[in-house]
Amino acid sequence: MLALAGRPLGISCEFLAEEPTLTCEDLGKLTLFSKDRETSVIEFAERVDVITFESENIDPLLLRGVPSHKIAPALKALATARDRLNEKEICKKLGIQTAPYFSVSTPSELIDGINEVGFPCILKTRTMGYDGKGQWRLNSFEDAHAASQALDWLSMRYILEGVVPFQREVSIIGVRDRNGMTETYRLTENKHKAGILRKSQVRIEDEQQGPAEEIFAKIAGELAYVGVLAIELFESDSKLIANEIAPRVHNSGHWTIEGATTSQFENHLRAICGMPLGSCASRGASTMLNIIGNPLDQDYVLGLRGAHLHDYRKSPRPGRKLGHVTVLDIDTEDYASTIESIEQRIIDV
Ligand code: ATP
Ligand code: MG
């Protein structure tokens, strides 16, 4: 989606990936990592003007041979946002509320952590988690004991978080350019099931827009951020509590392709390439639904007026995001029923 957004601006993309993928096959040269991963990155960097990433599950050490002016956002942002403990600590420093947390590296620290944050709590790997992977919900010491036996205490570090009794989950996505100018999109309300994002909805008015923008400005400024940044938040008793910082374009911002003046993908490219930012204004209310595990009947979706289908050309696998559909209020006669009929067709596994 980044590469597609680059085409009209004359920006061409190359990809460095772990394994062959159909998703970007026709969009630019695809290079696979060789055994010497650091050299792969250095050779790649020599061919391009700027490197960015679409996942935070990357070890910043892998990029240490690349001149810093060729990486955006900077490695400091990657190092902060890829580690849940660092995310929490930066929020604490900036006076942004988070779930209660405790750093856990040994079985006895897990017990200390439970005594500190109480049940129910969630044990998470500090790095490499996504779509709810690497998480264990603990309701009792029996759960903690069972989790403890299954964990990789030698090579992984963990964080224990108290469960936040939230009323809703939202995310604020914005972009910051090389001169420190920022723009933010409308707040998105997100619904998850089994730790995976299912649905994101943009409302035109939201009382939490202002408070969320303040959190965005603090974090983006602190990280001297360049590019699109997403912050996942819980709303609990009308207060915003930070959950995760994503140093990249974000699934809950996919609606911006059709639903905003400038998509998050285009704005990310503009920022990292030193171009002026585009407006983040939204074109009214819109809803994005993820297609997970099972493909959705293409003809059915395309037969619905105003539904925009995005197929990532990924092979189906339980829990895998295969594509998404966006519906804009201004594009359809009956916004609510169009969303509902797509939701009924999505059989997620
Ligand atoms: P992502 O796909 O967003 O990267 P992730 O696997 O990194 O997900 P989180 O965002 O930490 O994981 O958790 C996934 C979901 O689990 C959250 O969106 C939320 O619904 C729930 N969750 C996680 N942590 C907490 C918490 N401390 N309190 C309440 N719910 C939580
Ligand atoms: Mg998350």
Image: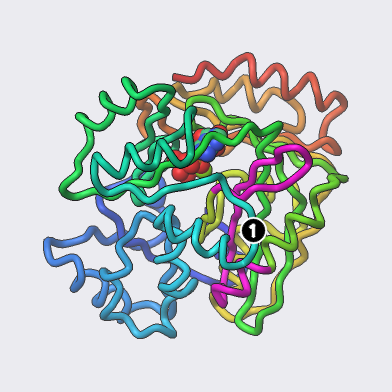
Mark 1 nearby-residue class (10 Å; few <14, some 14–19, many ≥20): some
Locate residue 253, reporting x and y percent.
Answer: 63, 48
Locate residue 65, reporting x and y percent.
Answer: 26, 80
Q: Give the left or right position of residue 67, taking residue 327 as reference.
A: left
Quarter of the figure with the C terminus = top left
Q: Is residue 163 visible?
A: yes
Give SS at disc 1: loop
User: What residue did someone put label 1 on?
Assistant: 96
Q: Which amino acid does label 1 sit on?
A: Ile
Locate residue 231, reporting x and y percent.
Answer: 60, 54
Residue lying at 28% horizontally and 29% vertically, measured from the top left = 147
Residue lying at 56% horizontally and 77% vertically, measured from the top left = 224
The residue at the far left in this view is 35
Residue lying at 54% horizontally and 25% vertically, measured from the top left = 193
Q: What stretch is highlighted in magenta?
A: 218-243
Q: In this view, does 294 lie above or below 183?
A: above
Q: Is residue 190 above or below residue 51?
A: above
Q: Check the image and tell me how it is coloured.
A: rainbow
Say if the magenta span includes residue 222: yes
